[in-house]
Image (spheres, helix red, strand yellow):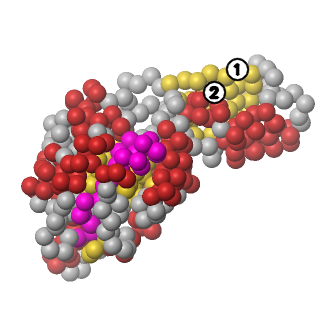
Amino acid sequence: MPIVNMKDMLQHAYEHNYAVGAFDLVSLDFLQGILDAAERAQAPVILSLAESHFEFFDFALLMPAVEAAAKRASVPVAIHLDHGASFESAAKAINLGCNGIMVDASDKPLEENTSITKTLVEMAHGCGIPVEGELGYVPGVEGEDAERHPGEICYTTVAEAQTYVENTGVDFLAVSIGTVHGRMQGKPELDFQRLQQINKALGIPLVIHGGTGLSDEQFQQLISNGVSKINYYTALSDAAARQIEQNASAAANSGYTGLVNNLRDAIGAETERCIRLWGGADRAKEVLARCRPWTPVEHLIIYNVEGLDTAGVKKMIAEGRRLLSAIPGVREVFTGEAMKEDDKYRYTWLVRFCHPAVIDSYREHPDHVAFADNHFRPVAGGRISIDYIAIEN
């Protein structure tokens, strides 16, 4: 049950003046270390997967583990696509289990960024999923993330932020006020007056990318000015690297398992330090009470077919699987045939939606409409269709 609505989670943080950590993970050691820390601190947490890191893992293979770990957690968890590259990336992430989305068009001119983000918001909201937009540009400076975020810093302005939020409908806004991706060079200078003005003008949860290298005092100032989500990766990566170096020094002939020994603990220690610093500790129960659970829906159709032979039925089903499985919010498409020939209904569709909102967006999606009108309904007149929501323990 602890996968929860991310908008509810961040709204609670915004109203109660703390920030939820969105910790980027690149392996099972990161996944387990982050959740271990959240459990120890009894805090809400966001498991973040950045498309800029996909070269290090297979997103489709890692997501089932992320979702399974989140479901068995006792603390509230959201799963977020960070720095998605396109509309297609966002739709795939939703269908794989993410319940928060960011597609980064912050390097584009305002009008183009607005257009891209608005299209994404319309799709994601149709799946019940909140969207993070970014305005202004947070570059990379030093470390492994630097090359993924080239260019110069571009600060967020109040006027553009108001226009962007009004025209896109984003739920959260990542702002640029002086942080960088990767490691800070020298003492970071943040424009807190700008942040304060943006927060006052918008009144929605704000997001900071590039949290590594900030002081405790700076984090507190960010949070007191509306920052409710802090993205964090480089310091976790550095903690993992130091642990590997220590393991290598301690046992020169160590194999892989020896090199990664205690990696989960090193990542968890830095994660827990941030959670406690940002004010999320001991808030799990109140957040769970406030947040709507993230509950999938099963769309079931049982039917018989008239006017098609066996080959025709298989062709119709294959076309349906191809079209319907790509619709945003569709987690899975199962098709089946009755095991006994004398059963009242011969065939079934079981389509799993990520959220109840998909019932309507799926019904109205042009690919579903075209398939239903041109291929399915003409031959499946006798059918039963029911939407089910899970009964949770």
Residue beneath the point at 44% across and 31% down: 295
Residue 127: x %, y % from top left: 51, 37
Could one spot residue 28 in this view of the protein?
no
* Category of crowding for the residue at label 1, using alpha-carbon neighbours closer than 10 angstroms: few (below 14), some (14–19), many (at least 20): few
Q: Tell which circle, 1 or 2, labels the residue nearer the N-terminal end.
A: 2
Query: Viewed as shown, does residue 97 lie left or right of 244?
Result: right
Residue 220 falls inside the magenta stretch? no
Q: Nearer the viewer, residue 107 or 52?
A: 107
Per the image, label 1 sits on a secondary structure element best described as strand
Residue 369, quarter of the rendered image: top right
Alpha carbon separation for disc pair 1 and 2: 8 Å
Image location (x, y in percent) of residue 349? 68, 32
Q: Is residue 140 above or below residue 88?
A: below
At which x and y percent is residue 12?
26, 34
Residue that numbered label 1 is attached to: 384
Q: Is residue 180 magenta?
A: yes
For the point 49% across and 56% down, the residue is 111
Magenta stretch? Answer: 161-183
Say which residue appears at 46% left-offset and 45% top-offset.
168
Q: Residue 287, located in which quarter of the rendered image?
A: top left
| The N terminus - image quarter | top left
**In terms of secondary structure, where does tag 2 sit?**
strand
Which one is nearer the viewer's eye here, 253 or 297?
A: 297
The image quarter containing residue 19 is top left
Residue in the foreground of this view, choosing between 90 and 268? 90
The residue shown at (54%, 48%) is 119
